Amino acid sequence: MSERLYCTIAGMMFSVAALIHLGCLCAGWDLVLAGWAIPLWLSWIAFFVSGTLGGFGLWLGSRGTD
């Protein structure tokens, strides 16, 4: 697997995670993980972190080789 393909796939996965967190924030849903309800303020942090990682991964995947 090439580095560009790896970065693109990782970027897409992080972007999907960011969209899921954004959807939960907009709908007001609480995420539950192993019986622990994740508060909405933690979803804001997860949204920004996963969105940043997703954008960075997609940017790295789209760079041309020199």
Image (cartoon, rainbow, N blue to C red):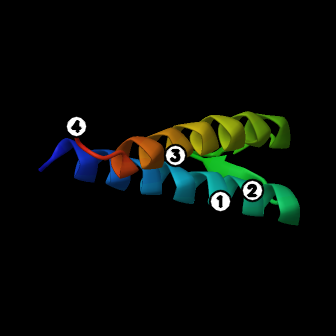
Quarter of the rendering occupied by the C terminus: top left
Q: CA distance from mark 3 to mark 4?
A: 23 Å
In the image, what residue type sits under mark 2? Answer: Leu
Distance from Cα at disc 4 to Cα at disc 2: 36 Å
Measure the C-alpha gap from mark 1 to mark 2: 5 Å
The reply to whether dot 3 and dot 4 touch (C-beta < 8 Å) is no
Q: Quadrant of residue 52?
A: top right
User: Looking at the picture, how far across and down is residue 46, in whole percent?
Assistant: 66, 38
Label 2: which residue? 22
2 or 3: mark nearer the eye:
3
Name the mark nearer the viewer: 1 or 4: 4
Q: Where is residue 26 drawn, in percent x and y?
A: 86, 62
- Identify the mark nearer the N-term, 1 or 4: 1
Q: How many marks?
A: 4
Instruction: Give the spatial CA distance, label 1 vs label 3.
Output: 10 Å
Disc 1 is placed on an element classified as: helix
Instruction: State left or right for residue 42 relative to residue 14.
Output: right
Q: Which mark is residue 19?
A: 1
Of labels 1 and 3, earlier in sequence is 1
Give whichever of 38, 57 is nearer the camera.
57
Q: In the structure shown, which secondary structural element does the residue marked by tag 3 occupy?
A: helix
Q: Callout 3: 10 Å neighbours few (<14), some, many (20+)?
A: many
Residue 47, quarter of picture: top right
According to the image, label 3 marks what residue?
54
Q: Amino acid at mark 1?
A: Leu
Secondary structure, mark 2, is helix
Relative horizontal placement of residue 12, taking residue 3 as reference (left or right): right
For badge 4, the amino acid type reads: Asp
Residue carrying label 4: 66
Badges 1 and 3: C-beta atoms under 8 Å apart? Answer: no
